[in-house]
Amino acid sequence: MTFPGFEGELGLVERRDGQVAPALAGRVAVVTGASRGVGKGVALGLGEAGATVYVTGRSLEGSEDRRGSLSRTVEEIDSLGGHGVAVQCDHAIDGQVEAVLDRVRAEHGRLDVLVNNVMSTPQRAELPAGARSQWDLHPFWEVPIAFWDTFHIVGLRSHYVASAFAAPLLIESGGGLIVCISAPGSSRYVGNIAYGVGKAGVEKLVADMAEELRPHNVTSVSLWPGFIRTRRVSRPQQHPFTTVPRPRSRCPRERSQLARQDGHDFESDRARTRIRLHRHRLDRARYALSDRPSTVSTDS
């Protein structure tokens, strides 16, 4: 899959008809879990490139969650030149997820990009005594069994559900891109078995979806943003397994800048960013990340 007229970093591009326009003008994207953090950063990057971006999550207004809200994300997308649409959705409820994709179909009749970012983690009040964050959830036999579902229902399972509802519309649109946010925890121990198994499952999901989507010109991608400087991870003591120095971290929107790149396994030494691609037509569907600095903060 390619975006017609797109060359280089997502920004203003000259199309084949000689007109200058945002690279993703006329394109439609859905980003799950976009009220803050990585999801918000990706949504802003897509909006800056001119896309219409549907953002989902449970917190519609700032009063519902002081850490961020969909309404705030939409305001920032619009200020960057895109068009944001906030859709309140609990990704643990399949019917609500299906309704999001039904709305996209009804309002635009197409979908070009789905970004599966949403993930649930235990709230601080739910953590066992002595645990400061999810990275303290070990050894596994001392961790509440219910936390397995916490990490996997809104996470691996919700990625599958959203992809299943989105696939028909992506195919009808002539092709598209599914991005699942993953992490190095998919392949190495990070102090939380339930989390790591969930991320490993994301990698398998991406690879197997690619096999079945290949004939339909839909690309399936797992994206490893690396260490992201969000408000939640601004306190290093909560992340004892993080080895990336904070000055080497990047804010979410920096990591969302998509660029064209030869090769299907790209790793930026400077940003420690990795994309693993499983895709159709290797010579036509090449995606990577650019570390072009952002001037917009995604902390709320």
Image (cartoon, rainbow, N blue to C red):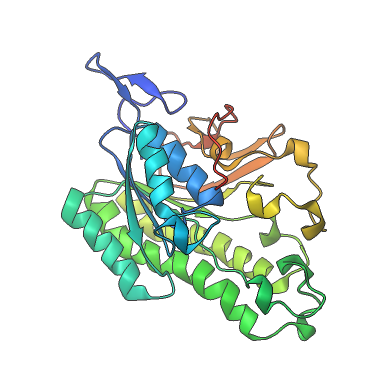
Left or right: 256 as drawn, with respect to 227: left
The part of the image, by quadrant, that contains residue 44 is: top left
In the rendered view, would you say 98 is above or below 184? below
Q: Nearer the viewer, residue 265 or 127?
A: 127
**Observer-nearest residue: 284 or 114?**
114
Q: Position of residue 53 (x, y in %)?
A: 34, 45
Most extreme residue toward the top, as rendered? 18
> Which residue: 23% across, 59% down?
103
Residue 54, visible in the rendered structure? yes
Residue name at image x 53 percent, y 57 percent: 66
- Image location of residue 47, percent across then percent down: 38, 37
Q: Residue 203's spot in the image, x, y percent?
A: 57, 60
From the viewer's perspective, tell me whether residue 220 is left or right of residue 38: left
Which residue is found at the position 79% from the left and 52% from the top? 236
- Note whether 151 is above or below 286 in the view shown: below
Observer-nearest of 45 and 178: 45
Number of dots carrying numbers: 0
Relative vertical location of residue 260 with respect to residue 16 in this rendering, above or below: below
Query: Whole-percent x and y of residue 13?
Result: 36, 20
Task: Name the foreground residue: 116 vs 72.
Answer: 72
Is residue 218 at least partly visible in the picture? no
When the figure is inspected, residue 3 is found, relative to residue 87, above or below; the finding is: above
Residue 199 quadrant: bottom right
Q: Give the position of the N terminus as an image quadrant.
A: top left
Q: Left or right of 21: which side holds 141?
A: right
